[in-house]
Image: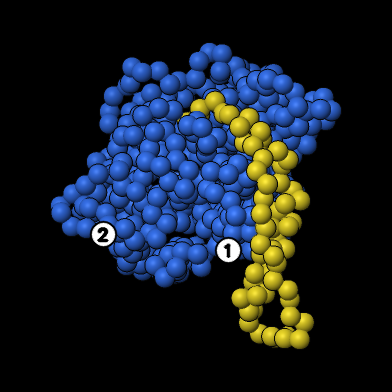
Chain colours: A blue, B yellow
Amino acid sequence: MAIPKICGIETEYGIAVQGGGEFNPILTSSLLINAYAKPAFKRVKWDYEEESPLRDARGFEAGVSEAPSDDESGLVNIILPNGARYYVDHAHPEYSSPECSNARDAVIWDKAGERILEDSIAAAQAIVTDNERVFIYKNNSDGKGNSYGCHENYLVDRRTPFPDIVRNLTPFLVTRQIFTGAGKVGAENATEQCDYQISQRADFFEVEVGLETTFKRPIINTRDEPHADPEKYRRLHVIIGDANMAELSTYLKVGTTAIVLKMIEDDFISDDYSLAEPIRAMRSVSRDLTCRETLELDDGRSTSAVEMQWEYLRLAKKYVQEYEGDDEISNDVLDRWETVLERLEDDPMTLKAHLDWVAKLSVLNAYRERDVLEWDHSKLKLIDLQYHDVRREKGLYYKLVRSGKIDTVVGEPEVAFAIDHPPEDTRAYFRGECLRRFSDVIVAASWDALIFDTGDEPLRKVPTLEPRRGTKESVQDLLDASPTASALLANLSK
Amino acid sequence: MAEQQRKPKPKKDEEEAPQASKTDEDVSNEMDELLDEIDEVLEANAEDFVRSYVQKGGQ
């Protein structure tokens, strides 16, 4: 039986400063994080010991360096009370959500990240000069050939053969763009021209399988860095997704992918849907606003993006019925997935209140009609960009939400709570609660450990190698019975 | 920036008061109102703003 798909979303945000001349994106990212962070959390260091971004899931260690340089690892890097990591990565502020147990929580803690970045702007704005204005965008491209990522992570059973993941997940990832795409005006990276395409990221994928994330980007990333017990787990690092504003896009992105991964673990997919040319298919699916154009399979059959998704959905319904029964989230994901596919087949524009790429396209089309604009008009490019502005009074996505033109999946009170509180049913709870209670004696932390310095003994490392342990149910009594960190450490040793 | 032409907005017919479903005209009026609202928040100097948005590559 497949293991639960503990998951998280990490987002590199785009940043800009207007009115201050040249700006340094690394310094500005640091400024944002430092301005936001409460002093108690700033002094807890990130523990890099267990990081090994060069280990490859195919079983070797790469020579090409993508590891953070010494300079970079010295940059601002904090752990938030909700269990997330907030740091400077590749000249962008990055928010890595805490571990979540389901797609709905993934949406809540992803949105909490947006609010944290929005609050960071307000905090930074109080520090910079009056002329300078700081902007943050939750998108994946500057429209000039530079891309930055929104990665998903899923806990996967180490026993699952990696080639099974590659074979069964690739066709799914290539075609899920039709509901995960955030929409983009134009093409980049020397790819075929188009007016508008479904995905922000599709133009940047160049190989089918590989370790890199900043160049020669692969559809399936092989980074083997589990941040958990390496004997039992992989952390599948999915780098192909767009950063989504629309909650349904995020919900389906994580929810459907989690079910497909469970099916792969349980060897439930018997047919081989391998695409003849996955990279080409990535780009053609992104450019096909009807979602129906023909895709060739390796074995000579042909299908379309929406038909391929129907195949996965048909299997997923059988799987959930057989293995998960009435699991609320899985069944809700299936229902919404089905509705979305029906509507994409009927007329994608009927999803303008639900999916990013359709919502954005409907606004762009309304502008094109009213103002008689050609697709290369800078106003359309501005709308494309400002759709992703995290400031709720300026961001066009939020304008649509306030006008009732986009449906949300979760409630704002849940998001507000998640800014300062961890999910309760993963190890993020233990991390967040320890930081909230004992940050003065925690010297370092990471996904899989907390390091305490209580003064009366050597540093003590508390490993958190089991992502499903450390839940509220299992540790709240222990924490409540531990008025100090020393008491907690003593109680843990019992 | 190029001069923008605008199509005239359709007028709302006050006499007709559909109660249940929205007419095409209602939808169109709603969209016009939304675009007006978006106009108010769009950053000034679209061309310069978009040109100056350059990111260092990331992951």
- Percent from the top left, x then y, of residue A168? 28, 49
Drawn side of residue B19 relative to residue A148, left or right: right
Question: In which quadrant of the rendered image does the C terminus of chain A lie?
Answer: top right
Q: Amino acid at mark 1?
A: Ala
Residue A263 screen position, x and y as percent: 32, 55
**Residue of label 2:** A303
A187 relative to A171 in the view: left or right: right
Q: Position of residue A321 (x, y in %)?
A: 36, 69
Closer to us: A157 or A486 = A157
CA distance for labels 1 and 2: 27 Å
**Secondary structure type for disc 2:** strand
Can you tell which mark lies on residue A353?
1
Chain bearing mark 1: A
Q: Residue at x 53, y 43 (%)?
A: A376
- Tell me the crowding category of disc 2: few under 14, some 14 to 19, or many 20 or more residues within 10 angstroms, Cα based: some
From the viewer's perspective, tell me whether residue A119 is left or right of residue A65: right
Question: Is A41 situated left or right of A262 in this image?
Answer: right
* Amino acid on which disc 2 is placed: Thr
Quarter of the rendering containing residue A38:
top right
Q: Residues within 10 Å of mark 1 (few under 14, many from 20)?
A: many
Residue nearer the viewer, A201 or A102: A201
Closer to the camera in the image, A71 or A192: A192
Q: Relative to A91, say whether A182 is above or below.
A: below
Helix, strand or loop under label 1: loop
Establish whether labels 1 and 2 are both on one chain. Answer: yes
Picture disc at residue A379: none
Residue farthest along the top direction in this orientation? A70
Residue shown at the point (42%, 30%) measured from the top left: A213
- Residue A455 visible? The answer is yes
